[in-house]
Image: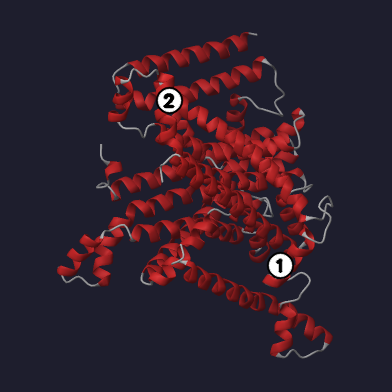
């Protein structure tokens, strides 16, 4: 009962604090604090409800239990993290985005290819590409190479479509100006078209970050060596060790947010001139 | 549209040719292996013929997948467990339920975010952060936990679809509901419109183009969610279960046919939304 009261109290406290924040004149501090308070409130309510209703720890572990498990099994989590994120997701992300970027530049030179590839690429980007995972695991074996291959396939088309669109972003007036300067194809590409394409390219890169993690984890459901986040999640569910599963999810969430945040930060420095980045 | 027909066709033809070539290349080692064991000598012709007709090829040729799809859709009874139509229907129902739930949740959240400053400040960042979490990784756990609570069948899969499809709807609808500019909002005020009236007559109609764009993304995401949601149920029914069963038993033709049916399903669903979008926007005078 006391825990339920705690949950309700936490909710009221968090809510009224945010109401107070939203009534104040808007500031950087307030816009940063409000979501944090909301998150802490949610975790507190979760803890209170789980303990108050005495929900089975196997079904939904309390946040404190998950945190305890996280601290005691950092070694396992680190091994899985290296296997899935560094070896699988990151290598696949770099290969996939790099290949898509180069192919987009090649495609851009031929309008015929562009008109043919863009609708197909848009179509493939909407398909359940993740279904390729079992096939690629069969082709490339159980280790990280197959995970990287899945990630390559997943990030390739969003990146391709975005880059091709971005390369068309500079308008004809600007391109004419480059021509009057006597700039050739490569110089125009480097000085005008690539910089103009950057907002689109970063859009593709940011979409790719979450896709890469999803691809690497889901591919491990179809077979993996005895480490990796996807492997740990599927085996821990079998052992009903849900606290370990949640710990892996926390790692995945932190990795995903950090990866996305990093890309957003790079975007901010590269495309500082774009209207969406101005303050 | 007509302009890009020939280029698209060229690219597709090229892809099919590439597929056949890759099938020869990937299946050749197995064909050679078998030939040396039985003491036969493979000419180029028999090699190609063999690589395009193996039972469990590394990469089945397009016509093998096409026959498999034909056999499992048209020639099988729809209620049979080996009919792809049956499996596609299982996946489709979870997809649609999740899509409807996700769209509902997304629209409600968007209205809350637009009309309530507290929600805007505290919920919106979390909606965005929720998508940087690889949610599909949690899919097996959600299924197992909901099964343990006693919820099984359609709903757990639909929950995953819902989670994936609500995000594009929230983001699109928030943008859409905020798209009327200050001048239009002022006009509503001079007409002494109530909050409800300015919602129904200005904000909601103005958000329609944004809504349809998000619905297309949400539908594709919803299908992915339903397929991944079927993986941990122990391969009972659905396209995801076909994928998993195929990968257990090395039935590559089965995997590819399930994959192509899933692709066709995605294309059809997104296409239907596109048609509804065109008709609705035309009747509203917006396109």
> Label 2 vs label 1: CA separation?
50 Å
Pointer 1: what residue?
Answer: B66
- Chain of the residue where label 1 is placed in the rendered structure: B
Above or below, A161 relative to B109: below
Going 62% across and 24% down the picture, which residue do you hit?
A62
Above or below, B139 relative to B204: below
**Mark closer to the chain start, 2 or 1:** 1
Q: Nearer the viewer, residue B99 or A161?
A: B99
Can you say which quadrant of the picture contains the C terminus of chain A? Answer: top left
The image quadrant of residue A75 is: top right
Can you say which quadrant of the picture contains the N terminus of chain A? Answer: top right
Q: Is residue B282 left or right of residue B190?
A: right
The reply to whether residue B169 is visible in this rendering is yes
Q: Is residue A19 left or right of residue A134?
A: left
Q: Nearer the viewer, residue B111 or A220?
A: B111
Q: Nearer the viewer, mark 2 or mark 1?
A: 2
Secondary structure beneath disc 1?
Answer: helix
Q: Nearer the viewer, residue B55 or A177?
A: A177
Q: Are marks 2 and 1 in contact (CB under 8 Å)?
A: no
Pointer 2: what residue?
Answer: B199
**Percent x, y of residue B88:** 72, 51
Secondary structure beneath disc 2?
Answer: helix
């Amino acid at each position: 009962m006391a825990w339920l009261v705690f949950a309700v109290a936490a909710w009221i406290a968090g809510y009224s604090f945010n109401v107070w924040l939203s009534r104040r004149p808007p500031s950087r501090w307030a816009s940063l604090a409000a979501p944090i308070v909301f998150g802490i409130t949610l975790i507190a309510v979760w803890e209170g409800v789980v303990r108050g209703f005495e929900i089975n720890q196997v079904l939904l572990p309390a946040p404190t239990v998950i945190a305890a498990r996280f601290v005691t099994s950092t070694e396992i989590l680190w091994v899985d993290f290296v296997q899935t994120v560094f070896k699988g997701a990151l290598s696949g992300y770099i290969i996939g985005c790099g290949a898509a970027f180069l192919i987009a530049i090649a495609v851009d030179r031929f309008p015929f290819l562009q008109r043919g590839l863009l609708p197909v690429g848009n179509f493939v980007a909407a398909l359940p590409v993740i279904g390729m995972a079992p096939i690629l695991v069969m082709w490339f074996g159980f280790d990280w190479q197959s995970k990287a291959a899945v990630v390559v396939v997943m990030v390739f088309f969003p990146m391709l479509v975005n880059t091709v669109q971005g390369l068309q972003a500079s308008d004809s007036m600007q391109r004419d100006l480059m021509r009057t300067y006597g700039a050739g194809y490569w110089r125009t590409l480097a000085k005008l078209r690539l910089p103009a394409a950057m907002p689109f390219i970063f859009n593709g890169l940011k979409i790719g970050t979450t896709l890469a993690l999803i691809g690497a984890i889901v591919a491990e459901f179809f077979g993996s060596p005895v480490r990796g986040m996807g492997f740990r999640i599927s085996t821990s569910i079998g052992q009903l060790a849900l606290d370990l599963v949640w710990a892996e999810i926390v790692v995945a969430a932190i990795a995903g947010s950090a990866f996305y945040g990093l890309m957003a930060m790079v975007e901010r420095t590269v495309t500082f001139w774009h209207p969406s980045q101005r303050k | 549209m007509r302009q890009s027909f020939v280029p698209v066709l060229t690219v597709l033809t090229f892809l099919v040719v590439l597929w056949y070539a890759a099938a020869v290349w990937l299946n050749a080692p197995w064909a050679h292996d078998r030939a040396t064991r039985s003491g036969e000598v493979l000419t180029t012709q028999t090699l190609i013929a063999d690589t395009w007709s193996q039972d469990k090829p590394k990469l089945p040729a397009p016509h093998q997948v096409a026959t498999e799809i034909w056999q499992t859709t048209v020639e099988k009874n729809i209620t049979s467990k080996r009919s792809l139509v049956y499996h596609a229907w299982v996946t489709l129902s979870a997809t649609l339920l999740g899509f409807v739930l996700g769209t509902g949740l997304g629209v409600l959240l968007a209205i809350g975010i637009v009309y309530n400053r507290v929600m805007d400040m505290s919920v919106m960042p979390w909606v965005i952060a929720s998508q940087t979490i690889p949610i599909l990784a949690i899919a097996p756990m959600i299924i197992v936990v909901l099964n343990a609570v006693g919820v099984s069948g359609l709903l757990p899969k639909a929950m995953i679809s819902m989670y994936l499809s609500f995000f594009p709807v929230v983001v699109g609808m928030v943008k859409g509901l905020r798209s009327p500019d200050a001048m239009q909002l002022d006009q509503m005020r001079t007409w002494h419109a109530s909050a409800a009236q300015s919602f129904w007559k200005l904000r909601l109609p103005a958000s329609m183009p944004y809504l349809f764009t998000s619905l297309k993304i949400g539908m594709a995401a919803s299908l992915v969610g339903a397929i991944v949601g079927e993986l941990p149920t122990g391969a009972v029914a659905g396209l995801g279960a076909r994928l998993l069963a195929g990968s257990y038993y090395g039935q590559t033709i089965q995997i590819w046919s399930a994959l192509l049916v899933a692709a066709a399903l995605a294309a059809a669903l997104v296409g239907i939304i596109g048609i509804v979008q065109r008709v609705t926007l035309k009747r509203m005078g917006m396109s």
